[in-house]
Image (spheres, helix red, strand yellow):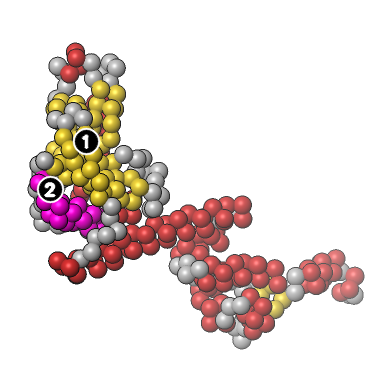
Amino acid sequence: MNLDRCPQAIKARNATLADPQLSIGVFARRSLLSPKALRLYDRLGLLSPAQVGAENGYRMYRESQLETARLIAMLRRADMPLASVAQVIAAPEADRAGVVATYWNEVERRHANMREVVRHLQLNLAGKDADYAMYEINQRDVPEQLVLTEQRHITAPELPAWIGEATMRLIDTAYSFTGGDQNGPMFVIYHGEVNDDSVGPVEVWLAVKLTPEDRTRAATRIEPAHREAYTRIRKSQVAYPQILSAYAAVEQWLHANGVEIAGPPREVYFADFMAAGPDDEVCDIAFPVV
């Protein structure tokens, strides 16, 4: 039998010519990956050789696999963990750019938070000599407000989830009334120390607009007009414990300027927190003053 005239043999030979096999050494050089890395990626299922010798275990790759190998090499140069690399490789080609973008957004968010934690640590370790000059302190007059409230004794780790849940409940309550509406930002009021051990209490306030009739059926409170000193912070600065630096900055300014505190401190959330990026301003740390 003449193999050159066998359709299957001709097809296989043409396929080999179009997509030749490469030894692991040649493939490693052309893909910019080491043989050791290629063996690891094979074990992890990221990039397996096209053929492994049954007797000698020698690995052969196809030239067409170089594109995937080079992609893995570039992702690893970006310090992407192997689990995330696997997500990119497993995604359809049209979706890979989106997977990388999602990963990088999370990296930037994490780095922004780490930067603020380190800054807080530096200030904390500096003690009484800490310089809070990076925080700009301002004052403003706040008009009388009608507010809905929810209070809880809670520790710092439990705080973020409860704030979000309480805010949604207050918003639902506001809109449950005829003509009910949110009439200003959301506040978090701290009546006591909140950390891993101390539990506040803490209140969430929502400024609302209600009709006189609705006000008789709602548990509302009048927040008197007052003056307050505040500093504006970014989303990456809101997390605990780095947010404590902003509180310390306002307190330091009040002490230095002889301004008396007239009420419990509060966080005033004036922006869409979930939609904001790490460097977007979202919150004021404020103290009512005389």
Answer yes or no: is residue 172 visible: no
Left or right: where does residue 245 sit relative to residue 27?
A: left
For the residues bearing labels 2 and 1, Cβ distance under 8 angstroms = no
Residue at 47%, 70% in the rendered image: 79
Q: Which residue is mark 2?
A: 259
| Label total for image | 2
Q: Residue 209 sits in which quadrant?
A: top left
Q: Secondary structure at mark 1?
A: strand
- What amino acid is at disc 1? Asp
Q: Answer few, some or many: residues within 10 Å of disc 2's Cα (few below 14, many 20 plus, some between 14 and 19).
A: few
Residue 104 in percent (x, y) is at 47, 59
Left or right: where does residue 2 sit relative to residue 282?
A: right
The furthest residue to the bottom: 56
Residue 225 in percent (x, y) is at 16, 31
Tell me which label, 2 or 1, sits earlier in the chain.
Answer: 1
Of residues 56 and 150, the one drawn nearer to the viewer in this rendering? 150
Q: Secondary structure at mark 2?
A: loop
Q: Tell me where the magenta segment starts and ends, as one range.
A: 242-261
* Magenta stretch: includes residue 259: yes
- What amino acid is at disc 2? Val
Q: Is residue 102 above or below residue 72?
A: above
Q: Residue 27 sits in which quadrant?
A: bottom right
The quadrant of the image that shows the C terminus is top left
